Amino acid sequence: MAVPKRKTSKARRDKRRANWKLAIPGMVKCPQCHEFKLPHRVCEACGYYKNKEVVKVEA
């Protein structure tokens, strides 16, 4: 069984874990109401997708 010869230091261990951060989702502006929304999804504010009203939004 493989066993480490030396203890891994905290600095070396933490350097390896440095790239585990979460990415911010890409947001785009809706062409109808100019609210931010996720790409390729219906706008929650106005209900439009690809310049067509897909969902009727109650205000």
Image: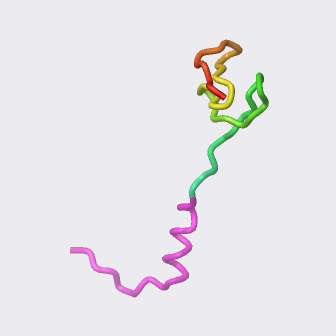
Position of residue 6 relative to residue 23, above or below, is below
The quarter of the picture where residue 52 lies is top right
Which of these two is toward me, 27 or 59? 59
Q: In this view, does 38 lie to the left or right of 6?
A: right
| Image point (20%, 74%), residue name | 1
The residue at the far top in this view is: 52
Which of these two is toward me, 4 or 26? 26
State how many labels appear: 0
| Image point (64%, 50%), residue name | 24
The residue at the far front in this view is: 59
Q: Is residue 43 left or right of residue 13?
A: right
Q: Is the magenta stretch mostly helix, strand or loop?
A: loop
Position of residue 41 relative to residue 18, above or below, is above
Instruction: Check residue 4 for magenta coloring.
Output: yes
Position of residue 7 relative to residue 24, above or below, is below
Which of these two is toward me, 55 or 7? 55
| Image point (28%, 79%), residue name | 3
Image: magenta residue range: 1-21
Image quarter hosting the C terminus: top right
The quarter of the picture where residue 54 lies is top right
Which of these two is toward me, 53 or 28? 53
Q: Residue 18 at what x, y percent from top left?
A: 57, 68
Q: Residue 12 at what x, y percent from top left?
A: 52, 78
Q: Residue 48 at what x, y percent from top left?
A: 66, 20
Q: How is the image coloured?
A: rainbow
Q: Residue 46 at what x, y percent from top left?
A: 68, 25
The quarter of the picture where residue 38 lies is top right
Instruction: Check residue 14 for magenta coloring.
Output: yes
| Image point (39%, 87%), residue name | 6
Position of residue 53 relative to residue 34, above or below, is above
The residue at the far left in this view is: 1
Q: Is residue 4 left or right of residue 34?
A: left
